[in-house]
Amino acid sequence: MSILATRAILAAAQMELRLFDLDFQLIHDAVLMIIAVFALFLIASHLLFNPVRNMMQNRQNRIRNELDSAAADMEDARALKEEYEARLKDIDKEAEAILSEARKKALASENKIVADAREEAARIIERAGVEAELEKSRAVDEVKREMVVLASLMAGKVVNAAIDTTVQDSLIEETLKEIGEGTWLS
């Protein structure tokens, strides 16, 4: 057993030496493997990493542009907000000015309407006075016509009765006294 054991130990020792021993085949395989990995890295970099890098760069640019645009929009919004706040401060003044102007116009309109109404009332009163004068004049004319009719009736009665002139004069005097001298003379 000792020979057999010695052979086994030698065989095992030779195997151990070969496992840790660098031979030409192992170095060749290692170099080929490194070249293959490097070539694979270059191909993968060219086919995969560069498009991913480009996509990431484009995404960064797009995000940067969107952030810049958002910042510009925020600045515009701030400016608009300030402008609207300034307008809101001035709107009370504008509203008061508009109301004041409207009150002035309303007062002027009221004064004009009152003046027009007074003028119209004066014209109506004047027209009524003129119409009253015309009506009075018509009434006087009517009384005069009635007096003429009465006088002619009386004259007809006097003629029919054939009374003397003294009686006629007394009848005319009586009639004039009844009608009134002021009416006949006006």
Image: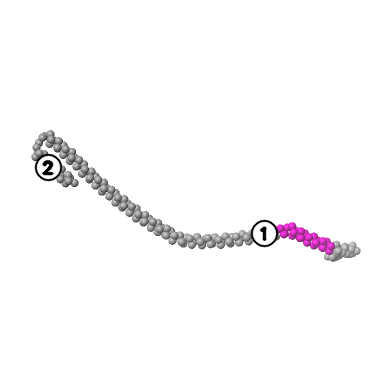
Q: Where does label 1 land, which residue?
A: 58
The three-letter amino acid code for the residue at tag 1 is Asn
Toward the viewer: 69 or 50? 69
Instruction: Calculate the distance from the C-alpha at mark 2 to the C-alpha at mark 1.
Output: 133 Å
Residue 39: x %, y % from top left:
78, 60
- In this rendering, would 176 be left or right of 46? left
- Give percent across and percent down for residue 119: 31, 52
Per the rendered image, the range of residues in magenta is 26-52
Marks 2, 1: nearer the viewer = 2
Mark 2 closeness class: few <14, some 14–19, many ≥20 residues within 10 Å: few
**Which quarter shows the N terminus?**
bottom right
Quadrant of the image occupied by residue 31? bottom right
Q: Residue furthest front?
A: 165
Q: Is residue 5 visible?
A: no
The vertical placement of 20 against 162, above or below, is below
Where 153 sits versus 73, above or below?
above
The kind of secondary structure the magenta stretch mainly shows is: helix
Q: Earlier in the sequence, mark 2 or mark 1?
A: 1
**Mark 2 belongs to which amino acid?**
Glu
Q: Position of residue 68 (x, y in %)?
A: 60, 61
Q: Which residue is mark 2?
A: 173
Magenta stretch containing residue 142, yes or no?
Answer: no
Outermost right residue: 3
Q: Nearer the viewer, residue 175 or 14?
A: 175
Determine the residue positioned at 24% across, 47% down: 133
Taking the spot 17% from the left edge, 46% from the top edge, the residue there is 185
Asked if the magenta segment contains residue 31, the reply would be yes
Which residue is farthest top? 160
Answer with left or right where residue 137 lies relative to residue 116: left
Q: Is residue 141 visible?
A: yes
- Element marked by disc 2: helix
Estimate how packed mark 1 is, as few (under 14), some (14 to 19) or many (20 or more) residues with alpha carbons within 10 Å. Answer: few
